[in-house]
Image (tube, rainbow, N blue to C red):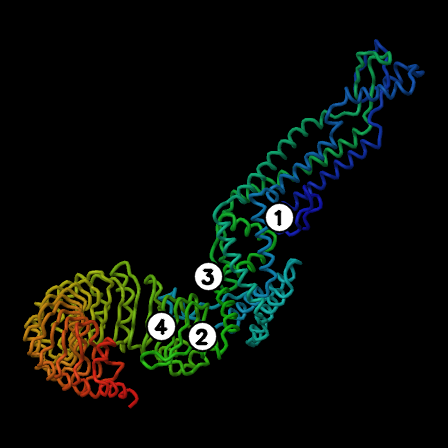
Amino acid sequence: MIPVTELSYFGEQDPAFKILKPWWDVFAEYLTLLMVLVSMFGGALQVSSGQILCIPVPEGLSIQWNHTVLEELNLNVFPAGFQTGLDVQQYYLINQWCYDNAVIWFSKYFPYLVLLHSLIFLISSNFWFKFPGTSSKIEHFITVLGKCLDSPWTTKALSETVYEESTTRIPVVSESSTDQSLSSINSPTKVDSSESLSQEIDFSNDVHKADKVSLMSKSSSQVLKAAGGIMVDNSSVKILDKKEGEQAKSLFEKVKKFRLHTEEGDILYTMYLNQTIVRTVQSVVILVYISIFIPQMCNNIHCIDALHITGFTDFFCIHGLWRMFRMLSLVYISAIVLYSCTCLYTLHWILYYKLKEYSFENVRVETGMDDIPDVRNDFAFLLHLIDQYDKLYARKFAVFLSDVSENKLLQLNLNHEWSQERLKQRLITNLENKVEMHLFMMPGIPSQVYDLTEIEVLKLELIKGVAISAAISNLKMMKEMWLYNCSVKVERQALLFLKENLITLRVRFGIADEIPPWIFTLKSLRELFIEGQLQTDSKISTALQMFRELPKIDTLHLKTNITKLPAAILDMAPHLLCLIIHNEGVKITSIANIKKLFCLILLRLLHCNLERIPSAIFSLTNLQELDLKDNNLSSTEELASCQNLRKLICLRLWHNNITSIPVHIAKIAKLEMLYLNKNKIEFLPPSLFKLTKLLFLDISHNHISKIPPHIEQLVELQHFAIECNKVTELPENLFNCTKLRVLNISHNNLTHLSPSIGRLRQLQLLDLKVNKLDKLPIELGQCTSLRKNQLIVEDDIFKTLPLEVREQIANTISS
């Protein structure tokens, strides 16, 4: 139906508003048009024809004023006629006087009443199109909807979905379906081709021709598939140019803002409901009072002239338009009855159905875009209205509500923007000498990335809804992947590749539900890094319970907030070699069961607020490295049981509150690296220097004022750091450690440097800055491995060396 827009009030109504007029509103407008025609026809008759004809009746004559009164006057009383003696002007006068005083008001003003009612119906039915609080939302909705329908992206998105659903769809493993990540993918919904073709014929004239072509392609592809299994190539789908892509991106933002604005209230719903109630009440009132006055309309009228203007008192009058007005009244009543029925049906539709909620369930099934959100309030009401006009509109509009659709668009634009040459410029070599590609805050992965076969590490950060395609199998050298705050889906072929090739995986998440479930299937994974906040210990156990099925994992790094060691980690005991827990200051209250991890060779408990060294650690006889950084440790008495740590090579007790080094530390006979920096140690016990295999000793940032002469026992010492202490002099015995390569004694109170430093022939770095030195000994020239840029001292102190020594140290760089 084409609604009546020519009769809108206050100017011509926008024809685009017709999509918000359901069939009952259109039908009501036709009824209103019929009422207007009735009023116009009645008014034309009233103007063009004589209104009333009257003749006088002699005084004293008593007759019944009914439909036979004229016959009685002619046959019984005045068989030979009756001479009135009135002239024409007197007849004109009495006709008008009787019309004004004897005819009921309904017969006189019937055409004008109908016209007035019709105008009120027009106003009340279109009032929400003009009301300031609703008209702006409606105009905005119509504008955005029109652009969405005309956008080339609408056609492309729906076409790609059709191809995915009907022919060449590649199954993906979604992060939102943990239990079904490896199960069979749901088969696409089959649409009968005849139904699709019949629906195609009924499409609105406003539908873009390209959209029809895409949907016909859907029907054709399904017919061909059903007939012979022929796969349809979607290479003919139009590729958007840059301008069209930017326009589509702008549309996504407009739709999001409009949705946010309209879902805040229900003014459109309320206004439409109120105007429907007004129309219903108005039509019922009109129907009641017209039904009362129509029986009072009659042809024969008795007129009494009490003033005796013409000499007669009684007049017999005939209303010439009575019969026509009565017929028009019946037509008008019929129109009002139908109008009332439409209003009542509208009220039923508004009140019975949940118009403040709109579900895209059918659209999700039809298009395959399963992330289209349901909407509410005014946004939902507008979609219900356009569904009454054509359900195709909501289907097309939903494309711009889908994150999947938006990601496809962004991916398309991304491929245009990031050429292979530009991507090569982002390749870097990291600290591990691996070729790394870091993609940050992108809408997806540019397809050209899969052509850079030299990539060894792929880092994805802050990328939402990204899908890893099967083309990743081109990256034969890629063994490591980072997923930082990403929601990732992996195609089946891509997952098979990752299962066989991926060795290291780093995952950072906001909540536990964001951990991709497909990583549970990576059988070749050996190193796993998980970082994110978990509200309860049960969630970390749930998140890790599937990793017990990964037999090759030997390194597990957790950066989270657990309070006890999860049971899922203990299940990895037979093959877990390295465990690193960074607890971000949250206290771990129970760690006794860590002794079950008997294969551990590296254990790092960082920022766990332990306060004491857990005794269970000393049961790990295979442990080679222990790191207890930043745990508020104040005592190390527990090291009395350290004799079981026979294989311990590296011990890190840094960033704590330790005040003294226990004598039991000497029991760790094979210790090679000891970190005691950033504590509160005041002196070094002789037992420390019994660790004759020590290669690295860092006691910087403490309160040490003296270095004992026993340090000469550390004959293998290569790195000694004691900066930021209170040392006033270096003992001569220190220079017996001739294997020293690094000596850091900055930020102390040294007043002189012994000439014996010349014995440190292998010294490569000497840091002397911020001391109280006056000069440097000439024997520094004997440190043949020392370079100028590795002698860190103030320039004025360096200039105290003889010129030949300075030149010798400076020339060491060029040599």
Q: In the rendered structure, which disc, 2 or 1, sits on the residue that comes first in sequence?
A: 1
What is the C-alpha distance between the residues marked 3 and 1? 29 Å
From the viewer's perspective, is residue 29 above or below residue 92?
below
Q: Residues within 10 Å of mark 1 (few under 14, many from 20)?
A: many
Q: Are marks 2 and 1 in contact (CB under 8 Å)?
A: no
Residue beneath label 1, please? Answer: 21
Q: Does dot 3 land on a helix, a strand or a loop?
A: loop
- The amino acid beneath tag 4 is Trp
Residue ranking furthest to the right: 80
Residue beneath label 3, please? Answer: 371
Q: Quadrant of the C terminus?
A: bottom left
The picture places residue 548, in percent across and down from the top left corner, at 26, 72
Disc number for residue 482? 4
What is the C-alpha distance between the residues marked 2 and 1? 45 Å
What is the C-alpha distance between the residues marked 3 and 4? 25 Å
The picture places residue 476, in percent across and down from the top left corner, at 39, 83
Q: Does dot 2 land on a helix, a strand or a loop?
A: loop
Q: Residues within 10 Å of mark 4 (few under 14, many from 20)?
A: some
- The amino acid beneath tag 3 is Asp
Q: In the rendered structure, which disc, 2 or 4, sits on the residue that comes first in sequence?
A: 2
Q: In the rendered structure, which disc, 2 or 3, sits on the residue that comes first in sequence?
A: 3
Q: Quadrant of residue 609?
A: bottom left
- The amino acid beneath tag 2 is Ser
Disc number for residue 469? 2
Q: In the rendered structure, which disc, 3 or 1, sits on the residue that comes first in sequence?
A: 1
What is the C-alpha distance between the residues marked 2 and 4? 16 Å
